[in-house]
Image (tube, rainbow, N blue to C red):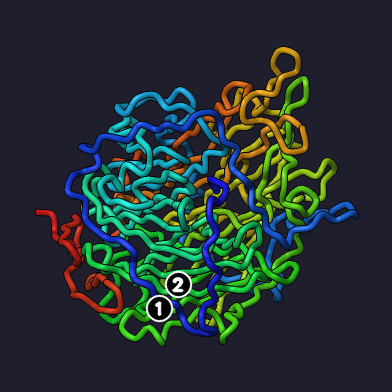
């Protein structure tokens, strides 16, 4: 979320039950690599507190929240109504220990790189990033940077995000509005990056790299919408780039919108379409499944299990906190690029969820509001921070094993402990060829008295789960992580570890005569800065599928508009990223593009890439 709307287009309705198929408004391929482009100097002055567009269905309960039934204490085994327990993924005989590998500062106050020194001008940062073969790309609102993932050195940036669209023309080149997304398409070894443009109309600006080098050239696209396309979240899938938005018409929430972008065309730099469905205002905060697994590009010619790729022709899955209490809503998005009339989302013309999955009872953070209740230490007492506890947190991590498919999700809840303590609720959903997903395990993590929120969760190829998050309360806002090893009791996380210590509070310090600092004034006359997040990211390293990379916000020095971010890899103890090897893919492998099967190659150890087909070649 970035700027208030400067215009409001006519509010249109999709034809019930049918996708709306719209070609990209603009499309080209950059003639120069990103590293050669000269950023436009930003003329923005002052500080901007981004508006917070909350889930309209979140309400504060007057009664104190009940104790969360999954609050970690004893091992949790899901009830029959929440999905029967099933064998865990194959695990090492000895429990693996996860530790910090690389750790370095990302974009934030005082951050310096080849592009100069970054100055914070807005809050929150909307920290997002992804890891590729040799680089980590991070994007916060306004600026993007490319890092050497092995050394942490800044290879490019910080530069304004819209530099990517320099020479493209229109809103994508002119506006730098934020809500960034960074994805690494592990199937094609390409970067997929996007932000919205919400001045002079509403657009999503999407760029797909032409190589695995994030500083190179990009195929560039603009997709337009009739309403404000807030809080975009994207997932990579073999037949499309899937994306969700919370749509607003003026100040009114009109429902979530889900779209599929034509991935095969975008990888080739060709004109591309989007297929979209507009949902009712009953549904908010959907997340598309995002494909994990270093062998995601590989699946046997018969489409049989054995790789991390979804079954041939599988729909993408979208998940949201349920419209009914204590449920998760799940939709199947089946896209057909050859006959778009066959594309479906959910059930029937109203796009009813394919499943309403029962889960253990929970209360949105902050007594049900999902608002601002995270305390910080200090005297005078600093403001309380936002939780965004009324929605699932990015990403919805998908992984396929030989005998099941897995989805990981997390959100912030009120634990029901004194002081409205906020904790991390997490789920693993599994589909074991039963026709649908159910809860395999779930837990709520909130040890001690501190608050935990703004989490992101992912799994490595061995089935070890790691969640990273913010922590605050008696400690300054910092970063921690916790692990569920593949052979641990269901629904439990191990003792958390410090990822990076916060040493200050986010606080608007009054000036001479009680003057409120720039950017801190509220319409009601108060002086505060509660905005935090709005999201973080945990994603697996495509070169080994063991290391998980996390990036998020922390505070170093008490003040306002001076946030910092951190980037870190988490991996098995005693290992380094360079020592980890890819697991062997199936003997006969195929890469899918769109709905077509492209070919087979023998098992291999080293990637050989072509424009549309990835094969493997044996190392001599």
Asked if disc 2 and disc 1 are in contact, CB closer than 8 Å, the reply is: yes
Q: Which residue is mark 1?
A: 335
**Vertical side of 237 occupied by 94: above or below:** above
Tell me what residue is drawn at x 55 percent, y 48 percent: 1
Which quadrant of the rendered structure holds the C terminus?
bottom left
Q: Quadrant of residue 319?
A: bottom right
Tell me what residue is drawn at x 54 percent, y 35 percent: 122
Tell me what residue is drawn at x 64 percent, y 69 percent: 283
Mark 2 → mark 1, Cα distance in angstroms:
9 Å
Q: Residue furthest right?
A: 63
Q: Quadrant of residue 339?
A: bottom left
Q: Secondary structure at mark 1?
A: loop
Front residue (pair 7, 315): 7
For residue 228, side relative to residue 371 (left or right): left
Residue 19 in view, yes or no? yes
Q: How far from the left and from the top, in percent, is residue 332?
A: 50, 77
Task: Return the mark for residue 316.
Answer: 2
Residue 306 in view, yes or no? no
Q: How far from the left and from the top, in percent, is residue 39?
A: 30, 35
Q: Residue furthest left?
A: 620
Q: Secondary structure at mark 2?
A: strand
Task: Return the mark for residue 565.
Answer: none
Count of all numbered marks drawn on residues in the image: 2
Q: Residue furthest top?
A: 512
How many other residues sit within 10 Å of disc 1, few (<14), some (14-19) or many (≥20)? many
Between disc 2 and disc 1, the foreground one is 1
For residue 379, side relative to residue 431 (left or right): right
């Amino acid at each position: 979320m970035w700027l208030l709307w400067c215009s409001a287009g006519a509010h249109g309705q999709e034809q019930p039950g049918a996708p709306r198929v719209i070609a990209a408004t603009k499309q080209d391929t950059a003639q120069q690599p990103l590293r050669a482009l000269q950023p436009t100097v930003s003329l923005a002055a002052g500080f901007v507190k981004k508006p917070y567009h909350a889930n309209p269905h979140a309400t504060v309960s007057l009664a104190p929240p009940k104790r969360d039934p999954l609050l970690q204490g004893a091992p949790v085994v899901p009830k029959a109504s929440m999905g029967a327990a099933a064998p865990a993924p194959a695990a090492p005989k000895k429990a693996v220990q996860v530790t910090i590998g690389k750790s370095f500062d990302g974009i934030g106050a005082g951050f310096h790189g080849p592009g100069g020194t970054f100055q914070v001008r807005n809050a929150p940062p909307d920290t997002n990033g992804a890891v590729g073969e040799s680089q980590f790309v991070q994007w916060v609102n306004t600026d993007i940077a490319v890092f050497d993932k092995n050394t942490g050195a800044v290879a490019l940036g910080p530069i304004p995000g819209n530099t990517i669209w320099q020479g493209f023309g229109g809103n994508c080149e002119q506006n730098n509005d934020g809500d960034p997304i960074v994805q690494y398409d592990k199937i094609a070894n390409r970067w997929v990056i996007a932000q919205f443009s919400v001045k002079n109309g509403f657009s999503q600006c999407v760029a797909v790299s032409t190589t695995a080098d994030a500083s190179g050239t990009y195929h560039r696209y603009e997709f337009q919408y009739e309403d404000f396309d807030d809080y975009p979240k994207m997932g990579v899938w073999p037949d499309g780039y899937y994306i969700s938005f919370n749509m607003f018409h003026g100040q009114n929430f009109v429902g979530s919108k889900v779209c599929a972008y034509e991935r095969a065309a975008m990888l080739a730099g060709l004109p591309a379409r989007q297929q979209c469905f507009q949902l009712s205002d009953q549904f908010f905060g959907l997340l598309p499944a995002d494909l994990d697994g270093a062998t995601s590009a590989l699946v046997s010619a018969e489409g049989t299990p054995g790789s991390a790729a979804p079954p041939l022709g599988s729909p993408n899955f979208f998940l949201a906190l349920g419209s009914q209490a204590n449920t998760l809503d799940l939709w199947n998005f089946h896209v057909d690029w050859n006959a778009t009339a066959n594309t479906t989302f959910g059930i029937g013309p109203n796009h009813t969820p394919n499943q309403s999955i029962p889960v253990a009872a929970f209360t949105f953070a902050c007594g049900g509001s999902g608002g601002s209740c995270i305390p910080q230490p200090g005297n005078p007492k600093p403001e309380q921070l936002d939780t965004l506890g009324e929605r699932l947190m990015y990403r919805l991590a998908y992984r396929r094993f030989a005998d099941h498919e897995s989805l990981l999700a997390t959100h912030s809840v009120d634990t029901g402990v004194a002081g409205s303590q906020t904790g991390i609720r997490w789920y693993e959903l599994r589909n074991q060829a039963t026709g649908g997903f159910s809860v395999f395990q779930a837990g709520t993590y909130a040890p001690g008295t501190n608050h935990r929120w703004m989490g992101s969760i992912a799994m490595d190829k061995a089935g070890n789960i790691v969640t990273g998050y913010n922590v605050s309360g008696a400690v300054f806002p910092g970063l921690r992580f916790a692990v569920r090893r593949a052979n641990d009791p269901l629904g439990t996380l191990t003792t958390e570890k410090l990822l990076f210590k916060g040493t200050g509070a986010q606080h608007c310090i009054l000036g001479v005569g009680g003057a409120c600092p720039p950017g801190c004034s509220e319409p009601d006359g108060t002086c505060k800065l509660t905005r935090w997040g709005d999201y973080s990211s945990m994603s697996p390293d495509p070169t080994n599928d063991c290391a998980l990379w996390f990036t998020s916000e922390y505070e170093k020095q008490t003040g306002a508009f001076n946030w910092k971010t951190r980037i870190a890899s988490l991996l098995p103890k005693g290992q380094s990223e360079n020592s980890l090897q890819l697991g062997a893919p199936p003997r006969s492998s195929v890469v899918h593009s769109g709905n077509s099967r492209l070919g087979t190659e023998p098992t291999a150890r080293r990637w050989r890439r072509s424009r549309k087909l990835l094969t493997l070649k044996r190392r001599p």
